Image (tube, helix red, strand yellow):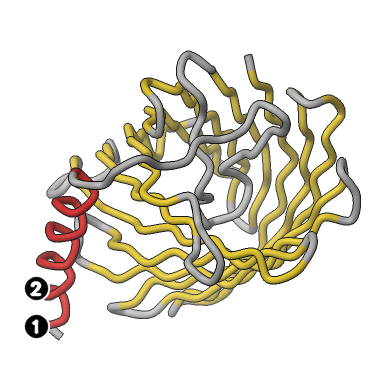
Amino acid sequence: MRYLYTSLRRWSLSLLTCSLLAGSLSAQTDNEVQPDRPDQSEGTSVLSPRRLQIEWGVGASSGHHNMGLMLRYGLVPDLELRLEGLLQRPYRGAVQVSDLTLSSKLALFSGDGWIPAMTLVGYLNYAPQEEARRVTGDLTLALEQELASGLSLTCNIGSAEGMRRLSLTAELGYNFTDRLSSFVEYYGVFGPAEHGGDLGLSYAVTKDFLVDLSCGRTFFASGAVNYASLGATYRL
């Protein structure tokens, strides 16, 4: 198991080095909003330079209420910066900040034929509730491939908890119309293993404003947790 985590760290560093040498890439088009929530997978879209996108959601799970906010800003072509925070309120307790994440998203390849679109995401995580490891870093490689008209497959492989664990996701997305889309997803973290699944719907009210609804279930060693959320995305 130790060899697996050592290999994961080496793979992540190699992946970061390769990404810095990448050439011309792909950015999110201005014709449609492509949020990074409410699913667990990272998409491959990157905001155009000087565009700001606000992604917000509220939800409830088996143990608490939560509210999340993500700010995305297109810095230069094919690179965006993101700031994300999560507030949680137990059913019997005070509101607390559970996570604060600063991340960057770099488009590696726009996709061509059987080669999927690729994006690298680097994270700097701050967890105030943790005593030993409050600040950690992780990496995720996102891949997206169009399978048929309106149907796409998105996969993520990366690290979690400061490159101590392996994270995997697989998501099928389908566009019913130009405005209405859906997804169904599997996600897991290994070492020890935790698994889950979720699904959701989103509706584009305008080309710059989108609302979403999702629900899911996560299986931990101590038991399962159900959750549901309602959110919105607005692009400036």
At 14% across and 51% down in the image, what residue appears?
A: 17
The local crowd at label 2, few if under 14, some if 14 to 19, many if 20 or more residues have their Cα within 10 Å, is: few
Q: Nearer the viewer, residue 209 or 223?
A: 209
In which quadrant of the rendered view does residue 2 lie? bottom left
Instruction: Give the x, y percent position of residue 69.
Output: 54, 29
The numbered mark at residue 185 is none
At 19% across and 42% down in the image, what residue appears?
A: 134
Residue located beneath label 2 in the image: 6
Q: Amino acid at mark 2?
A: Thr
Q: Amino acid at mark 1?
A: Tyr
Q: Nearer the viewer, residue 71 or 149?
A: 149
Mark 1–mark 2 contact, CB under 8 Å? yes
Name the side, left or right, on which 3 lies relative to 30.
left
The residue most toward the right is 177
The local crowd at label 1, few if under 14, some if 14 to 19, many if 20 or more residues have their Cα within 10 Å, is: few
Instruction: Give the x, y percent position of residue 108.
Output: 36, 49
- Tally the numbered discs: 2
Looking at the rendered structure, the secondary structure element under dot 2 is helix
Q: Nearer the viewer, residue 229 or 22?
A: 22
At 27% across and 53% down in the image, what residue appears?
A: 139
Note whether 111 is above or below 100 in the view shown: below
Residue located beneath label 1 in the image: 3
Looking at the rendered structure, the secondary structure element under dot 1 is helix
Instruction: Give the x, y percent position of residue 197.
Output: 62, 70
Name the side, left or right, on which 115 lies relative to 4.
right
Instruction: Give the x, y percent position of residue 194.
Output: 44, 75
Quadrant of the drawing holding the N terminus: bottom left
Quadrant of the drawing holding the C terminus: top right
Note whether 173 is above or below 90 in the view shown: below
Note whether 117 is above or below 202 in the view shown: below
Q: CA distance from mark 1 to mark 2?
A: 5 Å
